[in-house]
């Protein structure tokens, strides 16, 4: 059996095109991610639960043209802890509500809604993204210094506001609101004490070696992404490249969402070659399973082992992500 260190050296670099539309929150996050690529400034250890061995990937220094603003001494939040917990809690500012909505290998992202909005009439106004320790976005375009935020350096990169929320840790906020409102959102941000990410399903079977790397939750439903171990290492070991799960060979997506694509919502599990599997679940939602390069038989096996919560529209019934998947699929920490 190959050691994980051997597999690390064999990580694949092929990248199929992006394929899935996963809702407003995911789209907003990807639009922001398409504007920049992630680089990693320090070595990060992604610990795979079943292997008991750290996947340590050295990263070169990130070329980030941040402005020369002095940074005061501060104590950074711990880089260890539950991997599937958000790195900050939701919060409110006058006129807006900020709700954590997407967790990935490199960041926690929250969506900003207008205060008082709810359900399908909600429209994302902005998003706040806090990068994990060791992750720095590659800054391109115009960089303009601005007044520090909560005593920490801050700068504009075109229409995005970046600031250091603790020593060496960056966050950003951008969207359709004014610059003054973006600054208000950044000022109100408090790191730490994040809640677990949650999903509207329990998954009983996954192909060997698959790891949960993305959890998205929104008013339209629940969406997760998994990739093979080699994909985890690829995502973590290629600095300066715009790698999302959809550019990783073997990517698997499972969703429990409100159908908004005009396709039928079948009462019985329906699978098609290259079309994935789908079936109606409670509350008018749909379970969808799509896997790049997987056989229809394998997708059907995965789909049959997914149990959606009775009413996905009630977020209070959702499960913590680290309790909803086989232990073999979980990443247990990053440091």
Image (cartoon, rainbow, N blue to C red):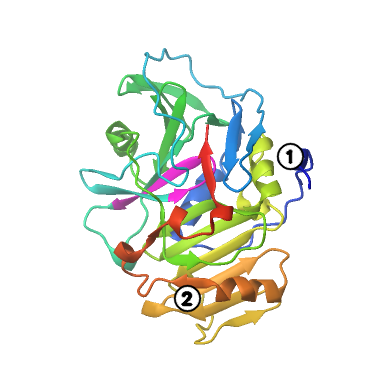
| Residue placed most toward the observer, 81 or 171 | 81
Residue 101 among magenta residues: no
317 lies above or below 179: below
* Residue 156 lies in quadrant: top left
224 lies above or below 244: below
Element under disc 2: strand
Q: Is residue 87 visible?
A: yes
Q: Position of residue 232 (x, y in %)?
A: 64, 45
Which residue sits furthest bottom? 267
Within 10 angstroms of label 1, few (less than 14), some, or many (20 or more) residues?
Answer: some
Q: Residue at x 50, y 73 (%)?
A: 287
Q: Residue at x 65, y 28 (%)?
A: 59
What predominant SS class does the magenta segment belong to?
Answer: strand
Magenta stretch, residue numbers? 102-113
Cα gap from disc 2 to disc 1, whole angstroms: 36 Å
| Residue placed most toward the observer, 238 or 119 | 238
| Residue placed most toward the observer, 135 or 32 | 135
Q: Position of residue 277 (x, y in %)?
A: 60, 76
* Residue 24 lies in quadrant: bottom left
Mark 2 or mark 1: which comes first in sequence?
1
191 horizontally vs 203: left or right: left
Q: Name the residue that disc number 2 marks.
A: 286
Q: Which-is-in-front pick, marks 2 and 1?
A: 1
140 horizontally vs 114: left or right: right
Q: Name the residue that disc number 1 marks.
A: 8
Numbered tag placed on residue 123 in the rendering: none
Element under disc 1: helix
Q: Is residue 121 visible?
A: no
């Amino acid at each position: 059996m190959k050691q994980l260190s051997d597999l690390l050296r064999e990580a694949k670099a092929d990248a199929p095109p992006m394929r899935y539309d996963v809702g407003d929150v995911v789209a907003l996050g990807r639009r922001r991610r398409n504007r920049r690529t992630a680089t990693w400034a320090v070595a990060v250890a992604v610990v795979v639960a079943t292997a008991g061995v750290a996947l340590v990937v050295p990263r070169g220094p990130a070329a980030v043209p941040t402005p020369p603003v002095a940074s005061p001494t501060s104590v950074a939040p711990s880089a260890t802890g539950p991997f599937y917990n958000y790195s900050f809690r939701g919060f409110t500012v006058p006129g807006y509500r900020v709700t954590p909505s997407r967790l990935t290998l490199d960041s926690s992202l929250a969506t900003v809604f207008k205060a008082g909005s709810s359900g399908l009439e909600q429209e994302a106004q902005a998003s706040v993204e806090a990068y994990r320790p060791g992750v720095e976005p590659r800054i391109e375009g115009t960089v303009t210094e601005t007044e520090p935020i909560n005593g920490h350096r801050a700068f504009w990169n075109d229409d995005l506001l970046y600031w250091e929320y603790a020593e060496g840790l960056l966050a950003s906020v951008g969207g359709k609101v004014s610059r003054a409102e973006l600054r208000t959102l950044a000022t109100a941000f408090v790191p730490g004490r994040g809640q677990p990410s949650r999903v509207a399903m329990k998954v009983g079977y996954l192909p060997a070696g698959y790891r949960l790397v993305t959890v998205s939750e929104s008013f339209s439903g629940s969406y997760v992404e998994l990739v093979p171990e080699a994909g985890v290492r690829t995502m973590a070991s290629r600095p300066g490249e715009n790698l999302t799960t959809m550019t990783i060979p073997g990517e698997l997506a499972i969703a429990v969402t409100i159908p908004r694509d005009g396709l039928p919502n079948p009462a019985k599990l329906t699978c098609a070659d290259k079309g994935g599997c789908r079936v109606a679940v409670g509350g008018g939602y749909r379970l969808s399973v799509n896997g790049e390069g997987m056989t229809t038989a394998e997708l059907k096996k995965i789909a049959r082992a997914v149990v959606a919560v009775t009413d996905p529209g009630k977020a209070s019934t959702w499960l913590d992500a680290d309790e909803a998947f086989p232990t073999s699929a979980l990443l247990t920490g990053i440091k």
